[in-house]
Image (cartoon, grey):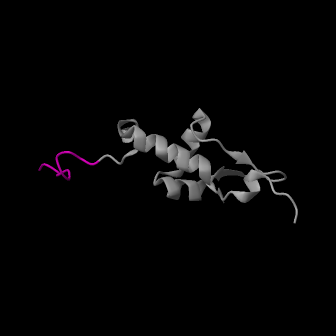
Amino acid sequence: MADKTSTDLQKLFTRTGAADFLAVSKQTVDKLTKTGALPAVRLAGIRAIRFRRSDLLALQHDWTASEPARNHLQKKTPSNGPSRRVQ
């Protein structure tokens, strides 16, 4: 049996898969990657990046440990209900 690296043994997620896993938008995954909060793996030979399950779980754990830090990622709802047109 051939040796496998730890990356080979881990599940890798696409950008969409990572967004679904974290329950955020793809744009948020892009921001997290750009700021270094979420490490990405570049696949050799193609212009694609993937995200390790362990990195997604670590980020999720960090968010759980400091829930207020995740407030900026939650959907905002109108505080006064739907807008009405005044005639």
Quadrant of the frame with the N terminus: bottom right
Q: In the rendered image of this protein, does residue 60 appear above or below residue 36?
A: below
Residue found at x 88% / y 62%: 2
User: In the image as oriented, which residue stretches furthest toward the right?
Assistant: 2
User: In the image as oriented, which residue stretches furthest toward the left?
Assistant: 87
53 or 6: nearer the viewer: 6
Percent coordinates x, y for residue 59 in the rendering: 52, 43
Percent coordinates x, y for residue 77 in the rendering: 27, 48
Tell me: 6 left or right of 30.
right
Query: Where does the magenta region start and end?
Result: 77-87
28 or 23: nearer the viewer: 23
Residue 58 image-quadrant placement:
top right
Residue found at x 31% / y 46%: 76
Tell me: 84 left or right of 54.
left
Residue 78: within the magenta? yes
Q: Main secondary structure of the magenta part?
A: loop
Residue found at x 58% / y 59%: 17
Number of dots carrying numbers: 0
Residue 35: within the magenta? no
Tell me: 58 left or right of 13.
left
Residue found at x 65% / y 51%: 52
Percent coordinates x, y for residue 11 in the rendering: 66, 59
User: In the image as oriented, which residue stretches furthest toward the bottom?
Assistant: 1
